[in-house]
């Protein structure tokens, strides 16, 4: 059992542990820069340096005041060194980027100038070629027009004769197609009549056969004592498959 005198003692110990943990956490926060990668940007290092620089070293730190001061001084020195190194590196990189951009701009301008000159030379050459080509085309066109005029009459006559031949061939094909269609229709009609006749004959033969079997079955039923009407009913219901497990074999 915890006595009444032990309770205040526990509270004091817990408060002391909390105080120590808080101070150690504050001191540890000044060493977060140690986890920064080697290429951490200057703006991050600067923010961290400013954060460490404003860390207040006073008596509220108690017995950890000296440790906090040492940690702060070490952090400020190291962060300052890293910041200077990184700022120098970033400045050099910015200068290299500027020089590279200027070089690329000059190269681009030279390239565009060469392209423009090449385009001008090409345009001049193409203009000369076009002029020569147009002259050649004009002479060829004039020659073609002359030949077309000379061949116009003969072509017109040939086209007329060809049209006559094509018309005659088309009419002949239409006549042949009409004849073939008529013959096929007659064949189809004859085949349909034959099929209808065969179907009717088959249905008639089947009807006679079934009637013969049904009459034989009726006669057998009458022979065992059924009346004619009852025998007809029995044969009918069996033929219509209304009695399970009983059928007439046709």
Image (tube, rainbow, N blue to C red):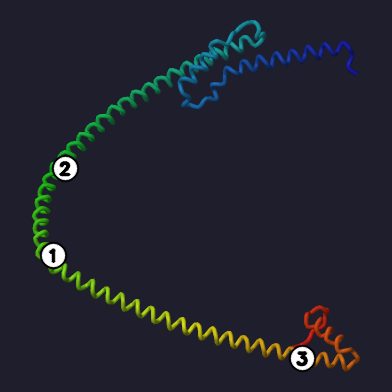
Q: Residues within 10 Å of mark 1 (few under 14, many from 20)?
A: few
Q: Residues within 10 Å of mark 3 (few under 14, many from 20)?
A: some
* Figure check: 227 above or below 99: below
Residue at coordinates 15% horizontally, 45% vertically from top-left?
A: 126
Q: Position of residue 85 (x, y in %)?
A: 43, 20
> Residue reaching furthest front?
229
- Give the labeled residue for mark 1: 152
CB atoms of marks 3 and 2 within 8 Å:
no
Residue at coordinates 65% horizontally, 9% vertically from top-left?
A: 61
Residues 17 and 239: in front is: 239
Query: Quick check: 46 left or right of 5?
Result: left
* Figure check: 239 above or below 18: below
**Camera-nearest label, 3 or 2:** 3
**Earlier-in-chain disc, 1 versus 2:** 2
Residues 206 and 66: in front is: 206
- Alpha carbons under labels 1 and 3: distance apart: 89 Å
Residues 165 and 15: in front is: 165
- Alpha carbons under labels 1 and 2: distance apart: 42 Å
**Camera-nearest label, 1 or 2:** 1
- Give the labeled residue for mark 2: 122
CB atoms of marks 1 and 3 within 8 Å:
no
Under circle 3, the secondary element is: helix
Q: Position of residue 217 (x, y in %)?
A: 81, 90
Under circle 1, the secondary element is: helix
Residue at coordinates 50% horizontally, 83% vertically from top-left?
A: 189
**Earlier-in-chain disc, 3 versus 2:** 2
- Give the labeled residue for mark 3: 213
Q: Quadrant of the C terminus?
A: bottom right
* Figure check: 92 above or below 58: below
Query: Quick check: 83 left or right of 112?
Result: right
Q: Quadrant of the N terminus?
A: top right
Under circle 2, the secondary element is: helix
């Amino acid at each position: 059992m915890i006595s009444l005198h032990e309770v205040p003692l526990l509270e004091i110990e817990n408060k002391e542990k909390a105080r120590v943990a808080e101070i150690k956490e504050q001191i540890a926060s000044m060493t977060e820069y140690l986890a920064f990668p080697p290429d951490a940007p200057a703006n991050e290092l600067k923010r961290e340096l400013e954060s460490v620089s404003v860390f207040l070293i006073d008596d509220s730190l108690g017995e950890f005041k000296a440790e906090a001061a040492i940690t702060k001084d070490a952090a400020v020195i190291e962060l300052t060194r890293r910041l200077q190194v990184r700022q120098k590196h970033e400045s050099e990189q910015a200068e290299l980027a500027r020089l590279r951009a200027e070089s690329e701009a000059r190269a681009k301008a030279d390239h565009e100038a060469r392209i423009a000159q090449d385009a001008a030379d090409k345009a001049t050459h193409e203009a000369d070629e076009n002029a020569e080509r147009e002259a050649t085309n004009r002479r060829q066109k004039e020659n073609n027009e002359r030949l077309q005029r000379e061949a116009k009459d003969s072509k017109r006559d040939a086209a007329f004769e060809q049209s006559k031949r094509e018309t005659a061939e088309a009419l002949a094909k239409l006549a042949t197609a009409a004849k073939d269609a008529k013959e096929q229709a007659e064949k189809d009609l004859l085949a349909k009549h034959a099929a209808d006749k065969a179907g009717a004959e088959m249905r008639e033969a089947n009807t006679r056969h079934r009637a013969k079997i049904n009459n034989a079955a009726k006669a057998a039923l009458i022979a065992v004592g059924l009346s004619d009407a009852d025998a007809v009913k029995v044969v009918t219901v069996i033929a219509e498959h209304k009695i399970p497990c009983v059928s007439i074999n046709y």
